[in-house]
Amino acid sequence: MSSAVALAAQMEECFASADVGYFICLVHSGVFSTSTCALACPHRSQSCCDSADMAQRCPAGATTQTCKALFDDTLFRRLQCQELSAPAVGAIVATCVLVAAVVCITWLRCRWSRAATTPRQRSCLRFEGQVRVLVWKNLRLRQHRPVKAVVEFALPLVFIAALVLLGALPSLQEPGRSASLASRGNCSGAAECDARLLATCRKNVPALLQTGEPSATATSFYSSGEPVFGLFFLLAYLRFVPSLTADIVREKEQRLTEGMKMLGVGDGALRLSWFLTGAVYNTPLALLVAIELKHGNVFPMADLATLFLFFAAFGLAIVSFATMVGVFFNKSKTAAVASALVWVVAFLPFYAVQDSASRAKHAAALSAPAAFALGIQVLAKEAQWGQDVYFYLAQALAPEADVSVGGMAAMLLLDALVMSALGWYLAQVVPQEYGVQKPWHFLFHPAYWRPQRRTGNRDDASDSLPELLEYHEMATPARDDFAEALAT
């Protein structure tokens, strides 16, 4: 890396400057070894926090301010302990919000179940009960096919384990260059020792910047794998797409969906139950995948929280895609094959934009598989920067990237939201085997958004019916008003 060589030359000139006091403070801060001037803490760890902070507080003269800025910006600020990353903060906030929502829903359910006085409260209780029963039903159905569930869950981990084994090969683990460091040698007196140490630091600066440099084999492995890593990880998760789509369509095929709707189960409860079921499986899987990739030295310098959010968002995108594609099919086997083909075809925009500008990449990221592949490509590029000091220097000297892993995680969440909304809309307008479909322009009619409810006498005995059957308050007459409004 020519920029690293130029940086080493600048640091050599800095050590040769006349501001001896600054550099004596620098080498005694704890960041450098006092015998060879090697980096005593090349990793971001708690033990290096005080050393990096002390090095930044070393006073420099007017003529050495440029050198101080060089050391602080390229080295010390990257070695010091930092606050939580934005993805880590996002993961913590999302977890806190989720826990608070669960606690709030549980508290309201316990309170309203004792005395639900308003129709809205009873409606919320029924909706919560429906979702809870439907999620339990989905999980129980998976338990009846344990081999299939285990294979789907373990397949991504097995694929990544192959990368972990490749990354553990000696040819990939060995350093790029092994340079011997000169030692300060014996000295008498503080002045003589400091002078010799400064000379040693100046001589060893080029070798210091090689700490963590990847081998030529590792660089070639990640650079050649950039175009295919995305497809590799996509295939690792591919089994989820046809399986989930088939499960959704199978309920239509066996008329279970219509039966549940006849009992009063709403379409919103059905869709939300599939999302929650997918989250139950995908969230722990995303955490295991992130841990395996980082601590298995596949992407060792990637942020763990970023990896977790990235793969968790990809799992939500898979669920959204399955609910959207399932609208078009009434046979589970046909839906499984077609969904897998469409999912793979949606990956192809990645190859068209992998070398394009940022705008084209973000446009292609509206396809969830392409966004996933672009995020994996960023991880593969960063893996070529090596580890430790070499990674931080390469990160500082690299041009600003068009996309980031966090940005692609956000795009995956956007894709999941768009596909969910599109799946809901298509379910209303695409002709199905049962039910009356709405016209394509139903969203533009005021009668849909402000239905007029007709009140009538309500059978008090219905309160004793089971929860799933307790749906006498549904706005069926309002649906008739909406149909009349469309007809006119």
Image (cartoon, rainbow, N blue to C red):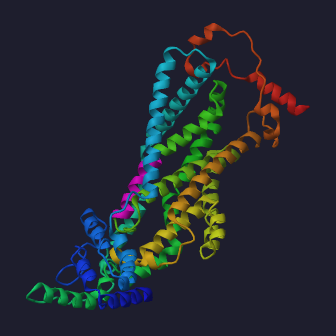
Q: How many marks?
A: 0
Tell me what residue is drawn at x 47 percent, y 41 percent.
97
Q: What is the quadrant of residue 158 in the picture?
A: bottom left
- Horizontal side, residue 191 vs residue 82: left or right: left
Residue 57 position, x and y percent, is: 30, 71
Res 6 → quadrant: bottom left
Q: Residue furthest right?
A: 488
**Which sits in the foreground, 195 or 363?**
195
Q: Is residue 18 visible?
A: yes
Q: Is residue 287 left or right of residue 378?
A: left
Q: Does the magenta run of residues contain 89? A: no
Work out whether residue 180 can be spotted: no
15 with respect to 218 (left or right): left
Q: Position of residue 300 (x, y in %)?
A: 37, 68
Q: Residue furthest front?
A: 62
- Residue 327 image-quadrant placement: top right
Asked if residue 290 lies in the magenta stretch, the reply is yes
- Picture layout, residue 416 above or below residue 192: above
Q: In the image, residue 257 lies at what x, y percent?
A: 63, 33
Report the residue at 65% width, 48% height from top.
Answer: 324
Nearer-the-camera pick, 284 or 263: 284
Q: Which residues are magenta?
A: 281-295
Q: Position of residue 276 (x, y in %)?
A: 51, 40
Quadrant occupied by the N terminus = bottom left
Query: Looking at the rendering, in which quadrant would you find the C terminus?
Result: top right
Q: Residue furthest left?
A: 188
Q: Please report the residue visible at 64 percent of the width from the left and 38 percent of the height from the top.
A: 252
The overriding secondary structure of the stretch rendered in magenta is helix
Residue at left 77%, top 21%? 477
